[in-house]
Image (cartoon, rainbow, N blue to C red):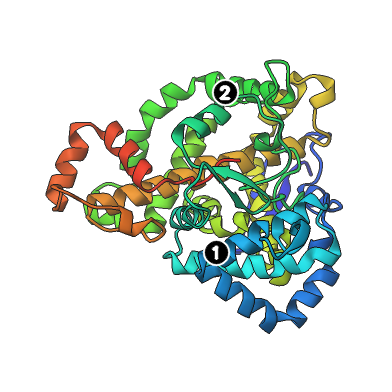
């Protein structure tokens, strides 16, 4: 039979996909289980073993450094008593992250976790604390690289051509099991003839400008009617129902890209791109320290996302997109490209938009979002929910932008 039977493990339901996969489609499981790439020695299993063995020692150093700014700077970039920076994460990076310097990462990870908790579990607050610890200068060190804070510097970098590699938040990305190897944000944006430019152009052509027979602007105009059918009597307090908000975002993003309105069960799968957000900021060493629990969840999410593409018979869109690329940039098998594009849609399109909508719902109800830099947010004269709603109605776009400025859905760029 040309039909394929797919079983959704979460919901125990069987879905018949009436369209056979193209011959060159391939297996998403083989993509996810391909050999690991670029694993440094300090993230090896032997390093993990000693990290557990010396856990009390690592914890003590990490907790103290995560609470005392000067010590955090010392274990990050070294100090006068540590010749050559061999006792710092930066020294480890400059040396190629060898096994004999792995102890730097064991304590640095616990220091970062401690500082995160001490700053209200807010990454923005954490980065501001680190910046202050480094003397509030133009640059500071985080993870494996140099960070900057001013709008002018960040804007200049983002507008420039960047030589990139698989990394997220200045941390080497775990590929191909956590992140796709050739994710768009990992590709160098070196001009209009680059692979990065070709992929971006193909995405716009096949999924936005002409995909599904209509432009994405037309599909966006149809969203209010689609949302109303699912959310017939909306109330302000409904924005506190995160599952409802996240499902709605998933359906809207998927419809904008593909012209298909997700079923409830499929939307519940796709919200994993938001609920698993914490998994992507962790380096491979941490994932192995927790026995790849998080990586297992992400692999399952990526597999189920591709299954949804297959269920709605969207394979040909990715086959066509792959065929439109230069031969040197085509993916083999095609499901590799599908995984890369769906990762971008899920990770940024769904995850980032959900975070923004959740913050918006909190602001309208005069609530501080859970992961925000709380002590830096003040309501001023808009001290009632009624005033907030009125201000939103004056100019929704400006209100949303200000919400995202105060509580950014993306707190780092890499």
Asked which secondary structure carries label 1, the reply is helix
Residue 302 against residue 313 in the figure, above or below: below
Q: Quadrant of residue 147?
A: top right
Which residue position holds label 2?
Answer: 211
Give the class, few, some or many, for how many residues have Cα within 10 Å of label 1's Cα (few <14, many ≥20). some
Determine the CA span between mark 1 and mark 2: 54 Å
Q: Nearer the viewer, residue 204 or 28?
A: 204
> Looking at the figure, which quarter contains the C terminus?
top right
Q: Residue 288 — which label?
A: none
Q: Position of residue 364 (x, y in %)?
A: 23, 49
For the point 37% across and 46% down, which residue is it? Answer: 357
Residue 346 is at least partly visible in this image: no
Q: Position of residue 191 (x, y in %)?
A: 68, 18
Which residue position holds label 1?
Answer: 70
Q: Residue furthest top?
A: 192
Q: Earlier in the sequence, mark 1 or mark 2?
A: 1
For the point 69% across and 81% down, which residue is it? Answer: 57
């Amino acid at each position: 039979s040309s039909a394929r039977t797919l079983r959704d493990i979460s919901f125990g339901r069987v879905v018949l996909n009436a369209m056979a996969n193209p011959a060159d489609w391939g297996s998403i499981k083989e993509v996810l289980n391909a050999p690991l790439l670029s694993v440094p020695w300090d993230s090896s299993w032997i390093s993990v073993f000693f990290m557990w063995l010396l856990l009390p020692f690592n914890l003590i150093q990490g907790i103290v450094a995560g609470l005392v700014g000067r010590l955090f700077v010392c274990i990050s970039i070294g100090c006068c008593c540590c010749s050559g920076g061999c006792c710092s994460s930066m020294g480890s990076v400059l040396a190629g992250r060898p096994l004999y310097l792995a102890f730097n990462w064991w304590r640095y990870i616990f220091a970062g976790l401690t500082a995160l908790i001490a700053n209200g579990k807010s990454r923005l607050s954490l980065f501001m604390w680190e910046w202050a610890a480094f003397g509030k200068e133009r640059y500071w060190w985080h993870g494996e690289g140099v960070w900057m804070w001013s709008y002018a510097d960040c804007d200049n970098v983002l507008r420039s051509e960047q030589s990139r590699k698989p990394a997220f938040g200045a941390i080497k990305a775990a590929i191909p099991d956590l992140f796709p190897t050739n994710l768009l944000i990992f590709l160098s944006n070196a001009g209009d003839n680059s692979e990065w430019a070709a992929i971006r152009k193909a995405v716009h052509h096949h999924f936005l400008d002409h995909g599904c027979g209509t432009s994405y602007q037309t599909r966006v105009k149809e969203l209010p009617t689609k949302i109303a059918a699912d959310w017939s009597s909306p109330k302000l307090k409904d924005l506190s129902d995160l599952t409802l908000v996240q499902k709605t975002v998933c359906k809207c993003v998927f419809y904008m890209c593909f012209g298909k309105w997700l079923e409830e069960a499929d939307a519940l799968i796709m919200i994993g791109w938001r609920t698993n957000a914490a998994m992507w900021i962790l380096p491979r060493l941490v994932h192995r320290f927790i026995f790849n629990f998080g990586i297992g969840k992400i692999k399952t999410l990526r597999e189920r996302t591709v299954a949804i593409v297959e269920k709605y018979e969207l394979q040909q869109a990715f086959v066509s997109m792959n065929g439109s690329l230069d031969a040197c940039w085509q993916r083999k098998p095609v499901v590799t490209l599908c995984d890369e594009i769906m990762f971008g849609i899920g990770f940024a399109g769904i995850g980032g938009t959900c975070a923004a909508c959740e913050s918006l719902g909190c602001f309208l109800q005069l609530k501080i979002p859970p992961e925000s830099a709380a002590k830096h947010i003040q309501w001023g004269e808009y001290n009632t929910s009624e005033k907030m709603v009125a201000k939103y109605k004056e100019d929704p776009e400006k209100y949303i932008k200000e919400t995202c400025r105060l509580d950014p859905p993306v707190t780092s760029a890499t």
